Image (tube, grey):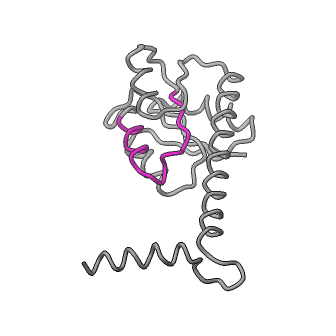
Amino acid sequence: MALILVVDDVEDNRVLLQLDLEDDGHDVLFADSGETALKQIEQHDVDLVLLDINMPGMGGLEALKCIKRNPAHENLPIIMVTANDLNTHVVQALDAGANDYITKPYSAPVLAARMRTSLRLKRALDNLRRANKRLEVMATIDSLTGLYVRRHFFELANKEVAKCL
């Protein structure tokens, strides 16, 4: 179904999440730190990230901010899965761009439902982005001639003239 990146420094947590995710038909990648997570995201077309907050080195909140800073990953769904239930961390994670926040021990059906919701939102945003690109092409290029339409031609011409002034 989807490629899920599990980011947690505790091996037992990764194994438990792997079992639950593979039972739901997902493919799973792992990272044991924020730094490793960033590398995995760059190397693989990840559909969703399950991210712990408390890790040595780059923690989950810092990794979340780094991921969301990259425009290529701004719509990548990230669900915080952590034992840390401090309200300040929940607020920080959601404000930094996390889609959801689940505390451990988690309920596998609830986690699966929240993942489905995040993945549906990602698909909708991806479809919207593709539709907008198609509309932009339709609005700027004549389908019969393959040339720019008059309005777009004049927009480009005005930009070029402005460069000369």
Residue under the point 65% across and 83% down:
146
Which of the 4 image quarters holds residue 60?
top left
Residue under the point 43% across and 43% down:
68
Foreground residue, 22 or 59? 59
**Above or below — where is 97 with respect to 125?**
above
**Above or below — where is 110 with respect to 140?**
above
Which of the 4 image quarters holds residue 15?
top right
Name the outermost residue toward the top: 86
Instruction: Tell whether position 77 is magenta.
Output: yes
Q: Position of residue 95 (x, y in %)?
A: 42, 28
Q: Position of residue 110 (x, y in %)?
A: 68, 22
Residue under the point 55% across and 33% down:
14
**Above or below — where is 138 with respect to 65?**
below
Left or right, 61 with reference to 141: left
Instruction: Tell whether position 69 is magenta.
Output: yes
Which of the 4 image quarters holds residue 87?
top left
The range drawn in magenta is: 62-80
Q: Position of residue 143 (x, y in %)?
A: 70, 78
